[in-house]
Image: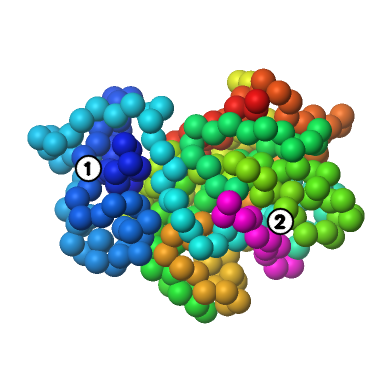
């Protein structure tokens, strides 16, 4: 099942014949509230919900996909992974990491699925990413228990000011260069882990003004989802609603010859098979 914020209300979402349908979720004011009560939610609310029941439900209504809102509003943490696709590592001329390269995106950079940005400089780049949404969370989570900590997945963009990111050289902190206003859009909804078949086979695709710039399947990640959950939780506690940006494929603007960066008027879209599409317009 998919969970969206729609008209400021958490909503069950189903897709049939290209049309979105929704049923409001009662008892919760936001998806953040649902994630903070994830185990009870799974036990008491979600267990019998499926697409057919949503569409047949008297409370179901057609939804306008342009009105989906930022699904998670107030995560505590946004850990992110650099150089997690081999081809991207090569285009950046970086040695293959021995362990996940973790940095932090600041929560004030979050935005919704219909996003717009003002460029922070002349070297702002696109990155599309699978984002893990934490449900139960915890500390020192084993690989074997990693999926139990996950509520689901969503689409994310790790918009990056390459000059700020690397002003002190290739080993500098990435955090500020990836945390300007609206540089971390997510959405359009959360696909629960039970709703996603074979996540590693999903294509991650970036288009800029309709032209494909990045495309790779999730199984091309160097460190898989279970490894990321286990590694990160071995250092920090993961809380319900935390979002983990899992890295981007090759095809970034900085990795091209000649380099290409976003400019005013560009439209940058990110899509993951079955998880939806988000869009950023450059003002």
Q: What is the x, y in percent for residue 223? A: 62, 61
- Viewer-nearest residue: 278 or 281: 281
Q: List the residue tagged with mark 2.
A: 175
SS state under label 2: loop
* In this picture, residue 158 sits left or right of residue 186: right
Query: Is 148 located above or below residue 105 in the figure?
Result: below
Q: List the residue tagged with mark 1.
A: 24
Check disc 2: other Cα within 10 Å, few if <14, some if 14-19, many if 20+: some
- In reply to whether residue 154 is colored magenta, the answer given is no
* In this picture, residue 53 sits left or right of residue 136: left
SS state under label 1: strand
**Rendered image quadrant of residue 263:** top right
Q: Residue at x 55, y 47 (%)?
A: 110
Magenta region, residue range: 98-108
For this orientation, the residue located farthest to the left is 58
Q: What is the x, y in percent for residue 122? A: 81, 33
Q: What is the x, y in percent for residue 28? A: 25, 54
Residue 198 seen from this side: no
* In this picture, residue 226 sits left or right of residue 106: left
Residue 7 seen from this side: yes
Earlier in the chain: of badge 1 and badge 2, it is: 1
Query: Is 114 located above or below residue 163 in the figure?
Result: above
For this orientation, the residue located farthest to the right is 169
Q: Residue at x 10, y 35 (%)?
A: 58
Q: Residue at x 66, y 41 (%)?
A: 159
Q: Residue at x 67, y 32 (%)?
A: 118
* In this picture, residue 3 sits left or right of residue 74: left
Distance from label 1 to label 2 (Cα)?
36 Å
């Amino acid at each position: 099942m998919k969970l969206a914020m729609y008209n400021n209300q958490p909503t069950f979402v189903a897709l049939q014949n290209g049309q979105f349908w929704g049923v409001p979720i009662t008892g919760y004011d936001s998806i953040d509230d649902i994630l903070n009560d994830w185990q009870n939610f799974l036990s008491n609310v979600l267990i019998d919900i499926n697409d057919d029941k949503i569409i047949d439900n008297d409370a179901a209504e057609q939804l306008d996909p342009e009105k989906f809102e930022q699904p998670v509003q107030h995560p505590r943490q946004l850990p992110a992974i650099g150089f997690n696709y081999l081809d991207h590592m090569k285009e950046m001329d970086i040695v293959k990491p021995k362990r996940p390269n973790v940095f932090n995106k600041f929560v004030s950079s979050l935005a919704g699925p219909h996003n717009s940005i003002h460029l922070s400089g002349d070297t702002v780049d696109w990155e599309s990413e699978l984002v893990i949404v934490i449900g139960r969370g915890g500390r020192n989570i084993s690989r074997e228990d990693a999926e139990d900590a996950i509520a689901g997945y969503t689409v994310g963009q790790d918009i990056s000011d390459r000059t700020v990111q690397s002003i002190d050289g290739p080993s500098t902190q990435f955090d500020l260069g990836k945390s300007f206003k609206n540089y971390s859009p997510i959405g359009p909804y959360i696909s629960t882990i039970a709703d996603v078949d074979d996540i590693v086979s999903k294509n991650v695709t970036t288009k800029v003004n309709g032209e494909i710039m990045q495309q790779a399947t999730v199984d091309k990640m160097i460190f898989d989802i279970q490894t990321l959950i286990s590694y990160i939780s071995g250092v920090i506690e993961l809380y319900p609603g935390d979002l983990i940006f899992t890295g981007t494929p090759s095809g970034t603007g900085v990795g091209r010859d000649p380099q290409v960066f976003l400019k005013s008027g560009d439209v940058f879209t990110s899509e993951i098979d079955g998880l939806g599409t988000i869009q950023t317009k450059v003002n």
